[in-house]
Amino acid sequence: MPYAWRLFRPVLLVTLLAALAFPLATPRTYAQDDDGESPVVIQGSLQLEELVQTLVDAYLERNSDAAVTVDAQGPSQGFEALCAGEADVVMSTEPISDQQIAACDAGANFVETVIAYQAVVLLAPPTAEVTCLDRNLIESLWSLGAPAEVTWADLASPTLTGPVSFFGPESFTPAYQLFAALLTAGELRDDIQLQEDPAAVLDAITAAESSALGFMSLADYEQTGAGGLVTPVAVRNERGECITPAQSTLEGRSYPLASSAYLYVNAASADDPAVEGFMQFALLDETGAQTIAAEQGYTVPLLASLEYGMNNLLEGRAGRTFSRPITPVDVPTATEGSVRVVGTSQLYSLTQSIANEFQGQYIAAEVTFDTLGNDAGWQAFCAGEADVLQATRAATDEEQALCEENGIDPYTLDLGSEALIFAVPASNDWAECLNAENVSALLGRGTDEAPAPTAWNAVDGDWPELDLLLVAPPRSTGETDYVIMSLLGDLTFAVRGDLVTDDDPLYRAQGVANTDNGLTWLWWSEFQGSEAEVSLPAVDAGEGCVAPSAETIRDGSYPLSFPVQIHFSQQAFDNPILRAFLWHFFERGSIETLGERPFEGLDIEALDTTVRDEVFDLLSAYEETAAEAAPEAEATGEAPEATEEAEVAATEAAPAATEEAAATPEATEEAPAATEAAEPAATEEAAATPEATEAAE
């Protein structure tokens, strides 16, 4: 439990003093087990020794034939041992430094994982109305040697003016030790009123007419249920952003008063079954870090982060992964600017949802959309009139030549493929392939002389005499217009008015499955996960019947399929908002949004790892080149010409083709995007959405 330190305080004190007095007391000799094999050797941080030793004890209790030793002599010696090949795992509360990496003469490499987080939470009385404090102000308030008298006016409280009283847990608590370690002075002020447990700190802050400013760990804050009584004070970082302590800000490493518990695995040991077995237990077993870290007062990483660390190990993904810079773009969230997005409206809702979240973070930025279709979109993009293009087809030779003429080198985010499919009941053994003539008869309004068919045999004489039930998506979402223009190519086609409509694709599919005479149409991505017992008819667009499948949709042979791509103009990378917008596609929220839309062929794991790393390097290369060019431009008095050099560097850093996320046949993940509603036309017959025009292109 978070308060368990009290039980072991005397023992910990003796252990700590002994370790400080005799830093080399633990010999670097590695015992052999009965089989003569070397044990897994863990070295590094004294601060993490208790956590890791408890993990080891739990692992050995379950695996009695295993051998693991913990030799905590500090992270510096641990990294030296890793470089010398004498340690399999190094525990550290700080990320490995450039100097420590450079000191590895033998070129030893490492795999980085995280098993826990710690964070300090600042709490003020609700009556103080203090919601955010600057990181530098916190340093000056809480460090040893800080002014003895601090008033609430110094903290910009609009309601309190009297002196501040400082409260916190006792000096041997993890929260106290972490807070001291986070301060430059390395020690906290000496007039803090130390309390036996976090509940007492909370009582002091929430007491009537309280003047207490206190702190505790995030784990203790959550366990005490303080959330219903007092809200943590956010911490303003160097970019002027107020960051609240929370799981998400620890995962993103944006909260300034936090620390991670790293386990660095020697890359040379990554394939050792003994090392892999221990790390598998520590990261993924429910009784490993997920339980033990929580019991010791740490915040446990999300399972996705633990799995990511294990995948790094299994795949041999060496180097910084968790501790690399959080973002490759140094763009303050108050930066003003705009990004123009053009192209197909079929991807509008997807891009718009990501753009909305982006503008919630970059409050002075604007993302504008001109969904003019693929043709006009490619023209605007290749003419340098747009920053981003969302497209459902590749560039023509003429469009590619225009891009080259204007120096437009796109970075392409390939999200896989989408398709429009038809669905009929599993018992339907007649509508095995639909062609343009069938679709025209099924969807056409008809006339007084030739009314719209109401039975299947009225569409095709060889089909049975069954009532026809058409269950359609709303016209505004674009599926119907896409079908019409892809197969009929007629913008004026009049759709019958007796369609049963519903905007839930899974409901439509299941509804049709429950009939013997139904037909519906929907996006392939929306159909994924459906358990409806339906058949998916093939489509003949003039070159024979092709059934929808993962393979035919990926290779484009299914007539109603199309690629899903978002292109970013590297020529426009001098626009900081564009760089930030591109990177935002790889933020956690955006990855989750993309993961909810399973476009065929999109590998969401590759998008979140390999492709993310490639884009990180692409943007980092641009930032570095632009930063190097800026002082030269200032020295010569010329306007910075960093963009050309930066574009070259960025192009070299970019992958040859952005196929990582959508290349493998096994990959599947991503989704549709509802399209813009159609503008009402003068007549109902002409009510075609933008998708209709795009399909004609």
Image (cartoon, rainbow, N blue to C red):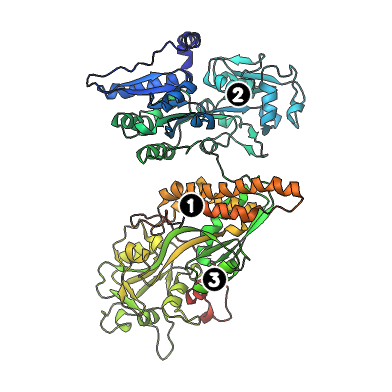
Q: Which type of secondary structure does the marked residue at label 1 adopt?
A: helix
**Percent coordinates x, y for residue 49 in the rendering:** 44, 19
Q: At 56% from the left edge and 52% from the top edge, which residue is drawn?
A: 649
Dot 3 and dot 1 residues touching (CB under 8 Å): no
Return the residue at label 2: 215
Q: At 28% from the left edge and 70% from the top edge, which residue is drawn?
A: 516
Nearer mark to the viewer, of 2 and 3? 3
Q: Which mark is residue 459?
A: none
User: Separation of disc 3 and disc 1 at Cα?
Assistant: 34 Å
- Amino acid type at image mark 2: Phe
| Crowd rating for badge 3 (residues with CA inside 10 Å; few <14, some 14–19, many 20+) | some
- Amino acid type at image mark 1: Thr
Whether residue 476 is visible: yes
Q: Which type of secondary structure does the marked residue at label 2 adopt?
A: strand
Q: N-terminal of the two: label 3 or label 1?
A: 3
Quadrant for the N terminus in the image: top left
**Percent coordinates x, y for residue 536 in the rendering:** 31, 68
Q: Return the residue nearer the eye: 652 or 349.
A: 652
| Crowd rating for badge 2 (residues with CA inside 10 Å; few <14, some 14–19, many 20+) | many
Asked if residue 130 lies left or right of residue 121, the reply is right
Q: Return the residue nearer the eye: 669 or 104.
A: 104
Q: At 66% from the left edge and 36% from the top edge, which residue is drawn?
A: 238
Q: Picture quarter containing residue 667?
A: bottom left
Return the residue at label 3: 401
Q: Return the residue nearer the eye: 658 or 182.
A: 658
| Crowd rating for badge 1 (residues with CA inside 10 Å; few <14, some 14–19, many 20+) | some
Q: Which mark is residue 593?
A: 1
**Percent coordinates x, y for residue 25 in the rendering:** 43, 10
